[in-house]
Amino acid sequence: MRRIAFINEKGGTCKTTLCVNLGAYLASEKQKRVLVVDLDTQGHAGKSLGLDVRGLSPNVFDLLTSDELTVNQVARATATPGLDVVPSNKQMAEFPLAVASRADRDRRLDRVMQGLSLYDFILYDAPPSMGLTSVNIMGACEEVVIPVALTYLGLDGCAEMVETVRAQAEAQHKPELRVSMVVPTLYRHTALADEILGKLKAYFPGELAATALGYNVKLDEAQSHGKTIWEYAPSCAGAKMLRAIGDELLARAPSKSDARRNGVAQARA
């Protein structure tokens, strides 16, 4: 099972777009069993998959704060066979306070995800901030995908995010935690975007995705209808870009030697 988090401390970088549509791609075209776990208070992953998340219970907050609920009781099937979602809503904003007195407050997500065998992929849609929820996510995943909007501020944020992942891997004693892919997003054919893309290639030669996700109106339209791009416009340019990114993510499956190499690198640091 691969556990992949889509994280960026900045908003508007296409985290949810990538998480939901790549999950649907893996389920519908690669016949994988996929669970999307929404951990953002906006609940956009669930909304993008056709759920009315307002007041929806049980949700991810209930799962993380209860000692009785299981993932199977909270996960909901979607219109895409093989793709389930654990929904979120504004109640998730109460999570840090609700678990503040618990000794395992930074490992609640990892605890509830232990023992799952039904899924081939667990995809975490993270909030646009680095707090207790994101710490929990990095404790429960092995791979991080960082979407980067092609702006100068986005470039700066990506460097900070890579350092955050490294620091969390060390703090949580998780040598297997790594950035598996940096995905350029909201690409337009401008000199500025090409310049920033060139900097990303120089800074992250091993992590940068070969395909940039360009701006595509069909992706926005699909989300507004609560559908994935594969349901709404499977032949559009946005779908073709996401298919290429999905294939590359599949090809980047970690080998057993990765964790050993990461462990040696951290020991030398």
Image (spheres, rainbow, N blue to C red):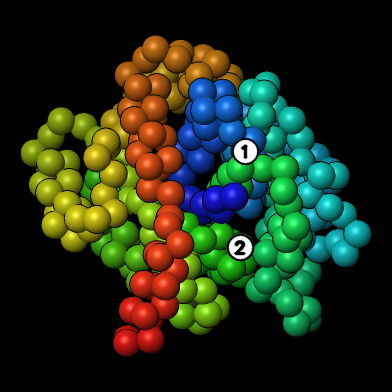
Which residue position is annotated with label 2?
A: 140
Q: Distance between the residues labelled 2 and 1?
A: 16 Å
Q: Earlier in the sequence, mark 2 or mark 1?
A: 1
Image location (x, y in percent) of residue 233: 46, 13
Residue type, mark 2 in image: Ala
Question: Which corner quadrant holds the C terminus?
Answer: bottom left
What residue do we see at 69% from left, 62% from top? 109
Which residue position is annotated with label 1?
A: 34
Q: What element carries label 1?
A: strand
Residue type, mark 1 in image: Val
Image location (x, y in percent) of residue 45: 60, 38
Whether residue 65 can be seen here = yes
* Labels in figure, total: 2
Graded by Cα atoms within 10 Å as few (under 14), some (14 to 19) or many (20 or more), the crowding at tag 2 reads many
The correct choice, above or below, for 33 with respect to 5 in the image is above
The correct choice, above or below, for 29 with respect to 112 in the image is above
Q: In which quarter of the image is residue 172?
A: bottom right
Relative to residue 150, is residue 34 drawn left or right?
right
- Direction right: furthest residue: 68
